[in-house]
Image: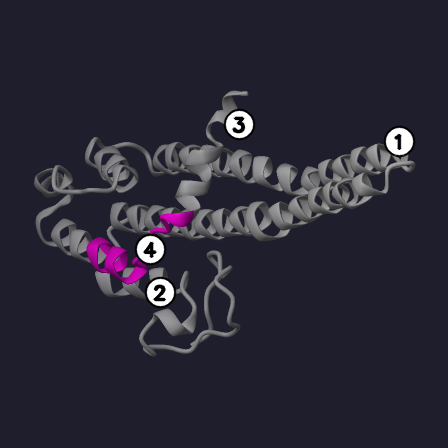
Amino acid sequence: MDQLKNLGKLIGNAFKAKNVDFQADIENIVRIANIARREGILALEETVNDMNDPFMQKGIMLIIDGSDPELVKSVLETELVFVRERHGSGQAILLQMSAFSPAYGMIGTLVGLINMLRRLNDPSTLGPSMAVALITTFYGVVLANLVFTPFAKKLAAQSADECLRKEMILEGILSIQDGENPRIIREKLNAFLPHSMTNGTREIQGEGRDTGREPVAE
């Protein structure tokens, strides 16, 4: 019941889609990398308070505190896992409702048919009873295919974008901690994006966004 109470919020999140600006995130990470390269990791303390992203802020604070790279990676990956689980539970609710809606529509159809058969001696009731039988199936199909399934798919797409963004930020934070060249960091983070989102600066094989962390052939 607690999860069902959040149904309205889930549908609202699907309506209020947030566009993820990957390029802005890359530029921000490169800017931070430049500061760390010129002035040292401790100089990032001045930039942490200006960050609007709690995930990035947490990662930068960890490297400022001198945490081991494996610890930084473990902490951020753990948060990423729980983000996926939270998003997955919301999608599962909508998908289950999509699966059940036609069945409940059929229950309404059976009720309508029962009422119709009970009053076969009264022809005036046949039309309304048949209408009830058909309209419930109609509602079930419409809710499943025009409401619950599309919203679940949209939430899944939003979740994929957010998780990809967090994976990219995680890679950038670890690269900053390793002291890598900002130009190399930019190229590494661009590997997370499809060709259409890299402003044509390099060729990427394939069209999907599911590039992961595999190196991209130049």
Q: Is residue 184 left or right of residue 138?
A: left
Foreground: disc 3 or disc 4: 3
Please report whichever mark, 1 or 4, sits nearer to the chain's N-terminal start.
4
Residues shaded magenta: 15-29
Q: Residues within 10 Å of mark 2 (few under 14, many from 20)?
A: many
- List the residue tagged with mark 2: 190
Classified by dominant secondary structure, the portion drawn in magenta counts as helix
| Between discs 4 and 2, the one toward the N terminus | 4
Q: Amino acid at mark 4?
A: Val
- Tag 3: Cα neighbours inside 10 Å, few (<14), some, or many (≥20)? few
Q: Are marks 3 and 4 in contact (CB under 8 Å)?
A: no
The residue that label 4 is drawn on is: 20
Residue 206 placement (x, y as % from top left): 53, 73
x and y, in percent, of residue 189 in the image: 34, 60
Label 3, on which residue?
4
Which of the image's four quarters has the N terminus? top right
The residue under label 3 is which amino acid type? Leu
Image position, residue 51 (x, y; %): 17, 42
Question: Mark 2 belongs to which amino acid?
Answer: Asn
> Can you tell which of label 3 and label 2 is closer to the viewer?
3
Residue occupying the point 27% across, 58% down: 26
Q: Nearer the viewer, residue 117 or 68?
A: 117
